[in-house]
Image (cartoon, rainbow, N blue to C red):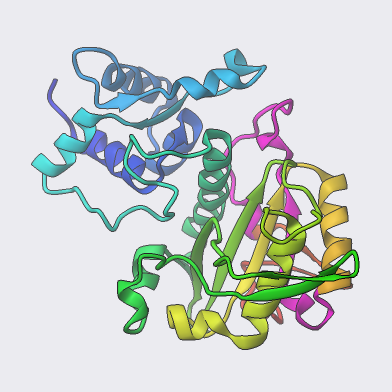
């Protein structure tokens, strides 16, 4: 099979986004959708095997009615190397490790689709530019640049739970970090946290993951501007995306309780289409152009440079 320039664009897209549905591939590379679907199928079938269809997507109860999700297969990785388009720095999230890397599939798809929504919105606005993790890595000062936990932020926290002071030294690891450059007006940077309505609000300790621990960690990072010392970025807004309106409201209430002094940096939104029982939605830039909720404050839009952080 002779690979076309468009085929290589598809492989490069899946190098950046570990997972992408047929709909998302079409949104990025364009062209006639029916022919694209046929081409994706050919890239997937033997003996070509440039793409893989992860078996985990069958876990969705409505899998037969959802767009097929693709990822790079080994032949796709080889082709990118052969054509000089392989780039270990390309992935926009550290979730997008090599194909044999371990990930929570549904969660990783949510992170990829959230970032894709924001990037697609930016592509349609010439005054905006997407700043991916590879570009942010270039800002990281020494010696953090050589840390094994490059994508994490140190955040030692303590909190009283049931009358006892609990301490946690675990690093804070966002699902992804990106930026938006506004023409002539500088840039903002964002950490994104995706939750499929599965992370508990509270636990009786800080060693297990919970939104309470996560919010306490972000409170520490935002107060001390750890993101500037560790990543070299001047600002950080935290995007929390979940699949349930009720769950989001509970998280917002917890943020108002724990993070009153940094609440202007915390933004919340839902994406129900990424839940187990929700129908998929077509790719759009709505996470960029729709308002995000801020605890006790006016809503916030990512595409507006003059919105106050």
Instruction: Write down the quadrant of residue 237 in the picture.
Output: bottom right
Instruction: Write down the quadrant of residue 142 in the picture.
Output: bottom left
Q: Reply above or below: 280 against 37.
A: below
Instruction: Write down the quadrant of residue 31 in the picture.
Output: top left
Q: Reply above or below: 115 against 167.
A: above
Residue 240 is one of the magenta-drawn residues: no
User: Viewer-proximal residue, 134 or 32?
Assistant: 134
Q: Which residues are magenta?
A: 259-288
Picture coordinates of residue 55, whole percent (x, y): 46, 20
Picture coordinates of residue 28, whole percent (x, y): 42, 43
Q: Residue at x 71, y 76 (%)?
A: 219
User: Viewer-proximal residue, 298 or 141?
Assistant: 141
Q: Reply above or below: 232 against 43.
A: below
**Res 295 visible:** no
Residue closest to the far left: 82
**Res 124 visible:** yes
User: Viewer-proximal residue, 24 or 230?
Assistant: 230
Q: How many marks?
A: 0
Q: Residue at x 41, y 29 (%)?
A: 70
Picture coordinates of residue 224, whole percent (x, y): 62, 87
Picture coordinates of residue 66, whole percent (x, y): 58, 22
Q: Reply above or below: 21 against 111.
A: above
User: Viewer-proximal residue, 130 or 232?
Assistant: 232
Q: Say which quadrant the C terminus sits in.
A: bottom right
Q: Say which quadrant the N terminus sits in.
A: top left
């Amino acid at each position: 099979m002779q690979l076309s320039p468009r085929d290589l664009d598809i492989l490069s897209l899946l190098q950046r986004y570990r997972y992408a549905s047929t709909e998302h591939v079409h949104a990025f590379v364009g062209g006639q959708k029916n022919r694209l679907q046929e081409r994706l199928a050919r890239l997937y079938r033997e003996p070509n095997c440039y793409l893989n269809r992860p078996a985990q997507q069958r876990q969705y109860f409505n899998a037969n009615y959802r767009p097929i999700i693709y990822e790079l297969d080994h032949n796709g990785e080889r082709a990118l190397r052969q054509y000089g388009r392989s780039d270990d720095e390309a992935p926009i999230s550290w979730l997008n490790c090599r194909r044999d890397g371990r990930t929570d599939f549904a969660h990783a798809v949510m992170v990829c689709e959230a970032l894709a929504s924001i990037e697609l919105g930016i592509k349609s606005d010439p005054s905006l530019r997407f700043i991916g993790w590879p570009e942010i890595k270039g800002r990281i000062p020494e010696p953090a640049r050589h840390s094994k936990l490059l994508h994490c932020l140190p955040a030692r926290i303590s909190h009283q739970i049931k009358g006892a002071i609990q301490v946690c030294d675990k690093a804070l690891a966002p699902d992804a970090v990106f930026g938006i450059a506004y023409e002539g007006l500088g840039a903002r940077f964002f950490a994104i946290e995706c939750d499929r309505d599965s992370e508990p609000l509270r636990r009786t300790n800080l060693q297990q993951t919970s939104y309470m621990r996560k919010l306490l960690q972000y409170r520490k990072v935002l107060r001390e501007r750890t993101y500037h010392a560790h990543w070299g970025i001047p600002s950080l807004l935290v995007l929390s995306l979940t699949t349930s309106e009720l769950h989001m409201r509970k998280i917002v209430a917890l943020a108002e309780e724990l993070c009153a002094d940094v609440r202007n940096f915390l933004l919340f939104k839902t994406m129900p289409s990424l839940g187990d029982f929700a129908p998929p939605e077509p790719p759009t830039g709505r996470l960029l152009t729709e308002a995000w909720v801020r605890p006790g404050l006016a809503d916030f839009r990512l595409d507006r440079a003059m919105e106050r952080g």
